[in-house]
Image (cartoon, rainbow, N blue to C red):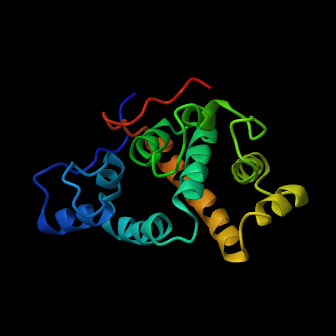
Amino acid sequence: MKQRIDGIMPPYDPESERALRRWMPPGVTQEPLMLFKVLQRHPDLASRMRTLGAGLLVQGLLSDADRELVIARVAARCGCAYEWGVHMAAYAEAADLSPDQVPLTVTGTPADPAWAPRQRALLEAVDQLHDTTRLGDEAWTALRDHLGEQEALEFLVLAGWYRTIAYVLNGLEIEHEPWAKAFPNA
């Protein structure tokens, strides 16, 4: 499949260079992600998206472990190999996911014995939201057993945000980053 909208390519104009660098973590010298280069085709939209995305990724209340488990599961349930592979390559260690747990974010269930109760609650909530766009009382109670009110609200925004990202990536058939982790067969 051919990517439906090409990303901007170097040499970048100064404004695009600054915008792309704002997407990347400080000190990273590798080329910006193709997702960011595609979004830069619409600089105003990219700027608005970066504000929310960076806020969730860098300034959120959820722990790295919670955040990355949620992102991995949302990407997996959406069949978004790009986002799953990027996050698992870059953040699986920060998420304290064992080598056995990483593929289970795609192939496992919340009931899998590899998950602690907190992880099960997060995975069950992601799965219910994905399947029904709602959380049942039992899933909400389990989630709230582990997350405060603000964290629970952030969880909902995070899950929805990464579903949006999956729509963009899958809808545009954006090419995978060569260094990303390979998506397990579900």
Horizontal relation, residue 181 to residue 133: left or right: left
At which x and y percent is residue 180?
A: 37, 37
At which x and y percent is residue 163?
A: 58, 52
Q: Which of 31 and 167 lies nearest the eye of the viewer? A: 31
Figure label count? 0
Vertical position of residue 136 compared to residue 154: above or below:
above
**Would you identify the image quadrant in which residue 164 lies?**
bottom right
| Rendered-image quadrant of the C terminus | top right
At which x and y percent is residue 131?
A: 76, 45
Farthest residue to the right: give it: 137
Residue at 26 percent across and 52 percent down: it is 32
Farthest residue to the bottom: give it: 150
Horizontal relation, residue 162 to residue 59: left or right: right
Farthest residue to the top: give it: 185
| Rendered-image quadrant of the N terminus | top left
Q: Which of 43 and 116 lies nearest the eye of the viewer? A: 116
At which x and y percent is residue 103?
A: 57, 31
Horizontal relation, residue 72 to residue 41: left or right: right
**Would you identify the image quadrant in which residue 162 lies?**
bottom right
Residue at 29 percent across and 52 percent down: it is 37
Q: Which of 56 and 131 lies nearest the eye of the viewer? A: 56
Q: Which of 174 and 127 lies nearest the eye of the viewer? A: 127
Horizontal relation, residue 171 to residue 70: left or right: left
Residue at 34 percent across and 45 percent down: it is 5
Residue at 39 percent across and 40 percent down: it is 174
